[in-house]
Structure formats: structure tokens, C-alpha cells
Image: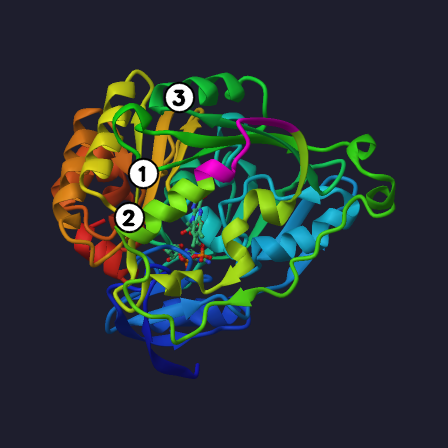
Amino acid sequence: MASRTVSLTGWGRIAPSRAELAEPATAAGAARLLETSGRGLIARGLGRSYNNAAQCDGGVVISTARLNRILDLDPATGLATCEAGVSLEQLMVAGLPAGWFVPVSPGTRQVTVGGAIAADVHGKNHHVAGSFARHVRSADIVLPGGELRTVTEPSDPELFWATAGGMGLTGLIVRAVIQLKRVATSRVRVDTVRTADIDETMAVLAEHDTSYGYTVAWSDSLARGARLGRSVVTSGDFAGPGDLSASDRADPFAFRPGARLGVPSWMPPGLINRYSVGLANEAYYRKAPRARQGELQTIGAFFHPLDAIRNWNRVYGPGGFRQYQYVVPFGQEAAVRRSFELVSRARAASFVTVLKRFGEGDPGLLSFPAPGWTLALDVPARTRGLDGLLASLDRLVVDAGGRVYLAKDSRVPPGTLAAMYPRLEEFRKLRAGIDPDGILASDLSRRLRL
Ligand SMILES: Cc1cc2nc3c(=O)[nH]c(=O)nc-3n(C[C@H](O)[C@H](O)[C@H](O)COP(=O)(O)OP(=O)(O)OC[C@H]3O[C@@H](n4cnc5c(N)ncnc54)[C@H](O)[C@@H]3O)c2cc1C
């Protein structure tokens, strides 16, 4: 199969590496690649993981860009059968006219079904819906060596739960059946609360988990003292037809992904720094109402505000940026508070700072979500003192019994990862069984010896 040598990075635009990029158009074509490859090989969807999980230095990267057909979508049951390269946006466009939405949506809809399973992604509804794999009825996986296997949770729980969150290291997912979620319109009824500090933020999030299907807090990472952890909490549920204006009722499932603005290529480096982010955080916090109820928002505005700007990752300049996301168990509220203190004291310029509560995790061996508090940060990679800050956060997270998210990780040491993921050895054993020659490998798996 034709392939070309390319340089790849993840969404954070750090750690580029070169590989042969192959784009099979069929499952059989993909299987041939896994049969014949003597080199390391890994799958790649839309490259929205932040670092190098979908890269394989000196090896082969299998893009699912051409495996992008929705094969069936039953309007009565909401079961969607699709190739692994189908994006969540494609599923929304196809499902909404019949009243079906994706069961779980991360903060961007530009991710593939394969990538959503491999990272077992979560969304604002984790406390009620769990993560993506919970809604996967079956997955067709090409195993190392080329065997194509249909895997369901009842028929092969081991492989199913190693693949969910397994970061592409158990095989290439070529097709999946997903149970979509019934919605009555494409608008979300949103309530907003502005909180004064971290204690109020956590209290509001806990309360809203009991009454809303979707909830999350945007936090001012630079606020200090009495304002530490001040936030804007937005919570909502899909609106009913009666909530819509008369004109919107004519098209209750309207969804227009539409044209997106681009970030100019001449963007000056260093635009995102502690001063500009301090101002932006202040403005965003002040602009939010103290409390507002029943605002109708589009899917784009509520779930994927960053998707409105194509390539927004370029605003961080050529140095790129690091994402850091942890979860610590409930009962570790002091660790959450402490993490806010560490970030604000380090003056780390994170504009996209998101705090949320996870519900029950699923049995994925390397699946990230677990019951507790999760915090995500975006920081320019060239920030002075960033390595020390993130190492301090690692220690805090390990001591609190938590973990970091592999889809975003760029630097956690292997020993620390083992302390975070108690089932890592099980995962390694399973991999040794299905891939004894170590055909599947990514830059991430090599660094962490996954
Ligand atoms: C703006 C933004 C917001 C985000 N918000 C969230 C969020 O709220 N929640 C969340 O959980 N994540 C979030 N993410 C992370 C993102 O959802 C995950 O990294 C997701 O895996 C990306 O999917 P992708 O198709 O781009 O996969 P890639 O980034 O290309 O690959 C990710 C991993 O999946 C594997 N993979 C991809 N396709 C296949 C396949 N067909 N078979 C086997 N393995 C495969 C790759 O090998 C790699 O290990 C966000 C990312 C961005 C950029």
C-alpha cells in the first residue's frame, strides 16, 4: 500500500516525529498492513490527543481518514454502525434529524469513533452517562498479525476493556456499533452560576450533579487568596420542543457545524502569557452573570466552543502547549484546593481550566475516569517553571490516589504512571499475549513502556 513519510504532532504541537503514513480505505487493506509490518505501527484518527499517542517515530501510522463511512443508523433504535474514522460531528449531522445525539461528547466534536474508544473519552455528562465505551455495543478490531475480530463486552470482556482506554495498543479498530442518545431538540437549556471561590465551586458542582445531565466549571486559574478557584459553572439538559421559540420549533433539530474561523498563520509567538491570560480570565469571569437560568444554547456553543476557531492550538505559538488533566477521588477536596494554589502561585497561564466531577468509572484497564474530581489545564509549553509545577502536581495526585489522562500526557515518568494505574501490569500481560512481537507501538507507549 502506498504511504508517504510525514512529520506528525498531537494537538499540543510539541514532540514531532516522522513516520510512514498509510491511509487504507478498507478493513482488509488495514489488515494487510498489520500482517506484513515488521516495524512499529499505531492508529491515528483526527490527531486531537494532545501529545504523541498517535505517533510512531520511524514506524508506520495508520490513518483512519478514509475509513469514514456511516454504514447504518437505525432511526428507531439509535444504533449507529460506522467505520472507525467517522467523526463525532458526522454522527451528529446524521443522527440529529431523527432525534439522536452522541452518548458522550468531549470538548471537541473533531474526534473519531476509533479515537473516542481508544481514549475512552468523557464529557460533561460523565456523572450520569459514564465514558464512551459504555455505549459501544461492539467493535471490529484488526489484531497484530492481521486477524479481524468482532469484540463485544459479553463475548470478550478482557479484550473489550483493554481496548477501551488502551490508546490503540491492542489493535486497529476498523468498525464499531454505538448506541446514540435520544434528544428532543438540538438546543440545550443552560443555567449559569458564578462562584466566588473554590469551596463554592465544589459545592455548586456537587449540587448540580444531582439535578442536571451535563455540568462543568470553567475556573480562573490565576485567581489567588480569597478568590482562589473562582469559577463559572454551566449546567444544562437538552431542551424540549416547548422551550423553543416559535421560529426554532419549525426545525427543532437544526445543527449547523458551519464555517469556522481560522487562526492566522502569522500569529506572533508568546501571545498567550500570564498577563494576557490574567486579563482574559478576568474578562470571562466578569462577563458571566452571577446567576442565569434557562438560556438556550446551540450544541456548538455548549459542548464545543473551541471548535468555532479552526486550529486554535496555533495561538500558543511555535512552542506549542501542554495539557494536564488529573482525577483524584472524592474525599480529596484538600488536594484539589492545593492544586489550585500551586497553579496560581506558579502564575501558569491557563485559559482553558476546567473542573468537573466524574461518576462511576468503567472497567477499562487504562481508562482514565474514576469517581472524583477532575481538573484540566492548558499551559504554553515554554512557560518558565512548568516542569517543576507539573512534577509537584504529579506528587499531589499520586498521594491523593489519583491519576493523569494518557490522551493528554506528555511527560509523566513511567514509575509514576504505574503508581497511578493499578491495572497497568494486567494491561501489559494482555498485550504480551496478543502482540508478542510488539508490533503495535506509539511514541507514548515507548516512553511509558505500556
Ligand atoms: C479541544 C479538545 C477538547 C478535548 N476535550 C476532551 C474531553 O472533554 N474529554 C476527553 O475525554 N477528551 C478530550 N479531548 C481529547 C480527545 O477527545 C482524545 O484525545 C481523542 O482520543 C482524540 O480522538 P482522535 O480521533 O483525534 O484520535 P487521535 O488523537 O488521532 O488518537 C488518539 C489515540 O487513539 C488511538 N486511535 C485512534 N484511532 C484508532 C483506531 N481506529 N483504532 C485503535 N486506536 C485508535 C491512537 O492510536 C491514539 O492512541 C479533547 C481534545 C481537544 C483537542
In the rendered view, tell whether residue 357 sits above or below residue 384: above
Establish whether ligand 1 lies closer than 8 Å to the Cβ of label 3.
no
In the rendered image, residue 54 lying in the magenta stretch gets the answer no
Q: Nearer the viewer, mark 3 or mark 1?
A: 1
Residue 350's disc number: none
Residue 347 lies, in percent from the top left, at 22, 43
Residue 142, picture quadrant: bottom left
Mark 2: secondary structure: loop
Left or right? Give the position of 433 relative to 123: left
The region drawn magenta spans: 285-293
Q: Nearer the viewer, mark 2 or mark 3?
A: 2
Residue 255 lies, in percent from the top left, at 71, 52
Q: Which residue is mark 2?
A: 349
- Labels 3 and 1: the sequence-earlier one: 3
Count residues near mark 2 (Cα–Cα under 10 Å), then give few for <14, some for 14-19, many for 20+: many
- Labels 2 and 3: the sequence-earlier one: 3
Q: Which residue is mark 1?
A: 221
Q: Are marks 3 and 1 in contact (CB under 8 Å)?
A: no
Left or right? Give the position of 172 relative to 137: left
In the rendered view, tell whether residue 382 sits above or below residue 264: above
Please state which of residues 229 and 173 is positioned toward the viewer in this rendering: 229
Give amino acid for label 3: Met
Residue 367, picture quadrant: top left
